[in-house]
Image (cartoon, helix red, strand yellow):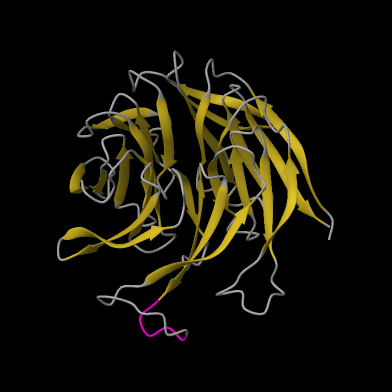
Amino acid sequence: MDTKVEPVATMLGHQERVWHIAWNPTGTLLASCSGGGDKTIRIWGKEGSNWVCKAILADGHQRSIRSVAWSPCGNFLASGSFDATTCIWNKTTGEFECSATLEGHENEVKSVSWAASGSLLATCGRDKTVWVWEVDHEGEDYECASVQQKIHTQDVKKVSWHPFKEVLASAGYDDKINLLHEEEDDWDCFATLEGHESTVWSLTFEKTGERLASCSADKTVKIWQEYLPGNQEGIPTQNNSPTWKCVCTLQGYHDRPIYDIAWCHLTGCLATASGDDSICIFKEDVTVNDPRNQPSFDLAVTLKKAHDDDVNAITWNPKDKGLFASCSDDGSIKLWRYTEE
């Protein structure tokens, strides 16, 4: 099979490095956020055949904006900043307005993520904590439901929700991944995944939620498989909670830390973004004998100089098969098209 990636568009406008990008649920808008003296969020959309900046959100934060995430309904955008706050931007009136500012973290907020239900928001930060916020149905009121202070011993880099369950994954500078769920009116860590030898920068669930991919400063990608109680492999579980095990490690493809990873829910492909300025796309070999316990992923494409500096984030469009976006310390956002022939 012939695979290739072609450039679609380069979006310029941010004055500093672009930390993070996120598609809205319909894949029609891309949000980006920037650091340094920029401190803005830009909303990009298509006009005719061109991708253009539709809006600039400039007044919500005092320092670098590290992460953005859309609510499942697409009416709200959360942004996490080094100023220790999370802003909620509401576009139900047509224009984006900062309708709520969530405070509580002691310092930099590193990642924000909405649960599939839209009723929960997670944030994490340099203060080693993970916060879960309850959201009312109007999206106007945000109440802290839980603060996890002991599950990580260092800076927490990333939070990501299961695609349909209220299960939260967090990744940190302590080389660990933690999985949390609600139990008896509080949130509890039911699994800790260890195996990376340096900071875990990001993680992404497969569309079934039964597998998780993580990437690290150790330059590897790990695939983790969920084993439910009573699993056919006989892998032990505790307290009626699933066990997660590493079933595959991808290494030797990047020369520097891998900062982000995205699992495409349309194609099953994995994309990685690295400090070596490159992007890799991996495709699973579905012909292996035991894809559940011994999966195999092949390198489909490498984009060696995808950007002129570190590639900080990568994300697949949720509706347009093969379309993905990347952003970089070089200040640019790029759109790409992956195809298989």
The spot of residue 75 in percent (x, y) is 40, 41
Residue 236 falls left or right of residue 280? left
37 or 242, nearer to the observer: 242
What residue is rendered at 39% in x and 59% in y? 193
What residue is rendered at 59% in x and 29% in y? 310
Residue 28 occupies quadrant: top right
Is 229 part of what is drawn in magenta? Answer: yes
206 or 152, nearer to the observer: 152
Up-down relation of residue 148 to residue 96 (above or below) = below
Residue 9 occupies quadrant: top right
Up-down relation of residue 65 to residue 161 (above or below) = above
The spot of residue 155 in percent (x, y) is 33, 38
The spot of residue 338 in percent (x, y) is 73, 48
Give the total number of marks visible in the rendering.
0
Question: Is residue 177 at all visible to an observer of this figure?
Answer: yes
Residue 170 falls left or right of residue 301? left
Dominant secondary structure (helix, strand or loop) of the stretch shown in magenta: loop
What segment is highlighted magenta in the picture?
A: 228-232
Residue 76 falls left or right of residue 215? left
Residue 106 occupies quadrant: top left
249 or 334, nearer to the observer: 249
What residue occupies the far front of the structure in this picture?
Answer: 197
* Quarter of the picture holding the N terminus: bottom right
The spot of residue 183 in percent (x, y) is 20, 65
Up-down relation of residue 208 to residue 264 (above or below) = below
What residue is rendered at 70% in x and 33% in y? 306
Question: Is residue 49 at all visible to an observer of this figure?
Answer: no
Is 331 part of what is drawn in magenta? Answer: no
* Quarter of the picture holding the C terminus: bottom right
